[in-house]
């Protein structure tokens, strides 16, 4: 499906670089579309042919839009839409802009998604090691009758079928991704701050608390055990004191109404409230994001990290 085609990767950040290099190393014709910036210079250093975004989109038969969600609509409307030809394919690594109709491709082009469940650097390293990575795949629009084959071909070429390409949809990918960020990771972040602040207020040494929490790397090892042994089966790797404490205190930590709060977060994602809120935040210059990031970077944990920092090469 990809032989003889030109694949245009728009963007050369974390996912763009990883996927472009993987496609090239799978012996396919890849070009990169970037403005004249540091990302374009890096693509040139990596030996890839580079062009402006509009020119790359015009030259490509398959376009992979691998820039951040929040800038995709502007780039699409200004530099890509006018160059789309009948029978071409437009690919995404996230369902966000298609799901919320911020980008609506013409009916005569294929629209698909290959969404690695992995950060960009690991998309590259796992390809090179032969392990691959899981991904979600979906067809949003099948104008040619070949969109599914193209989708799976791209997934395979970047290493996304070795660990499983799971049939999904643009909407499902968005719901799972945003809910993980806004409930799972947000909850973990809040609990970690509370863990640190409560113990330090009780007189515990900040360095010891931060090490127990995540700097020792134990949290990473537990996550690996969950993956290899099973989410609950890995409990046997902990003492029975630990097992009893974890299993009996979980509801107390989350508190009453956790299920309803989870449903509220999910509903705001599904009905578009979050997308509209984020759009307003962007038009206002992202003041809330800037304030909250600034507060996070002033948290005492940052100083503890600087005092205790070590590289993985030291381990």
Image (tube, rainbow, N blue to C red):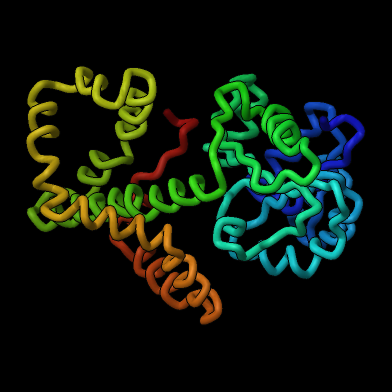
Q: Which residue is drawn at 8% across and 26% down?
A: 241
Q: Give the vertical position of 194 relative to 245 (above or below).
A: below
Q: Give the vertical position of 182 relative to 228 (above or below).
A: below
The quadrant holding residue 257 is bottom left
- Please provide percent x and percent y for residue 34: 79, 57
Q: How many labels does the image show?
A: 0
For this view, does 7 lie left or right of residue 278?
A: right
Comparing 31 with 139, the one in front is 139
For this view, does 221 lie left or right of residue 129?
A: left
The quadrant holding residue 277 is bottom left
For this view, does 131 lie left or right of residue 8?
A: left
Comparing 209 with 181, the one in front is 181
Q: Which residue is drawn at 19% across and 55% down?
A: 194
Comparing 215 with 143, the one in front is 143
Q: Give the vertical position of 257 relative to 158 (above or below).
A: below
Quadrant in the picture for the N terminus: top right
- Please provide percent x and percent y for residue 89: 78, 46
- Please provide percent x and percent y for residue 164: 56, 25
Q: Which residue is drawn at 56% across and 33% down?
A: 167
Residue 4 can be seen in this image? yes
- Please provide percent x and percent y for residue 185: 35, 49
Q: Which residue is drawn at 38% across and 24% down?
A: 227
Quadrant in the picture for the C terminus: top left
- Residue located farthest toward the bottom when viewing the structure as drawn: 284
Residue 43 can be seen in this image? no
């Amino acid at each position: 499906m990809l032989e003889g085609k030109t694949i245009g990767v728009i963007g050369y950040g974390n996912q763009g670089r990883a996927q472009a290099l993987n496609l090239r190393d799978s012996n396919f014709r890849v070009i990169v579309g970037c403005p004249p910036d540091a990302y374009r210079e890096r693509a040139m250093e990596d030996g890839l042919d580079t062009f402006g975004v509009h020119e790359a989109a015009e030259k490509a038969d398959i376009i992979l839009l691998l820039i951040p969600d929040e800038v995709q609509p502007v780039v699409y409307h200004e530099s890509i839409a006018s160059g789309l030809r009948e029978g071409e394919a437009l690919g995404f690594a996230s369902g966000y802009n298609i799901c919320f109709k911020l980008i609506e491709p013409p009916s005569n082009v294929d629209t698909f998604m290959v969404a690695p469940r992995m950060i960009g650097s690991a998309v590259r390293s796992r390809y090179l090691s032969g392990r691959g990575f899981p991904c979600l795949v979906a067809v949003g629009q099948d104008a040619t009758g070949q969109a599914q084959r193209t989708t799976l071909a791209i997934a395979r070429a970047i290493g996304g079928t070795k660990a499983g390409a799971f049939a999904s949809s643009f909407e499902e990918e968005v719901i799972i991704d945003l809910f993980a960020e806004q409930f799972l990771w947000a909850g973990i972040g809040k609990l970690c701050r509370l863990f640190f602040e409560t113990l330090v207020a009780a007189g515990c040494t900040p360095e010891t608390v931060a090490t127990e929490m995540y700097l020792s790397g134990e949290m990473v090892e537990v996550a690996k055990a969950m993956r290899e042994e099973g989410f609950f089966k890995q409990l046997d790797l902990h003492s029975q004191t630990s097992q009893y404490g974890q299993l009996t205190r979980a509801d107390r930590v989350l508190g009453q109404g956790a299920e309803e709060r989870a449903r509220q977060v999910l509903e705001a994602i599904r009905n578009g409230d979050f997308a509209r809120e984020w759009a307003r935040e962007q038009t206002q210059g992202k003041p809330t994001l800037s304030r909250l990031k600034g507060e996070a970077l002033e948290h005492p944990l940052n100083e503890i990290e600087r005092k205790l920092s070590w590289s993985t090469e030291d381990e």
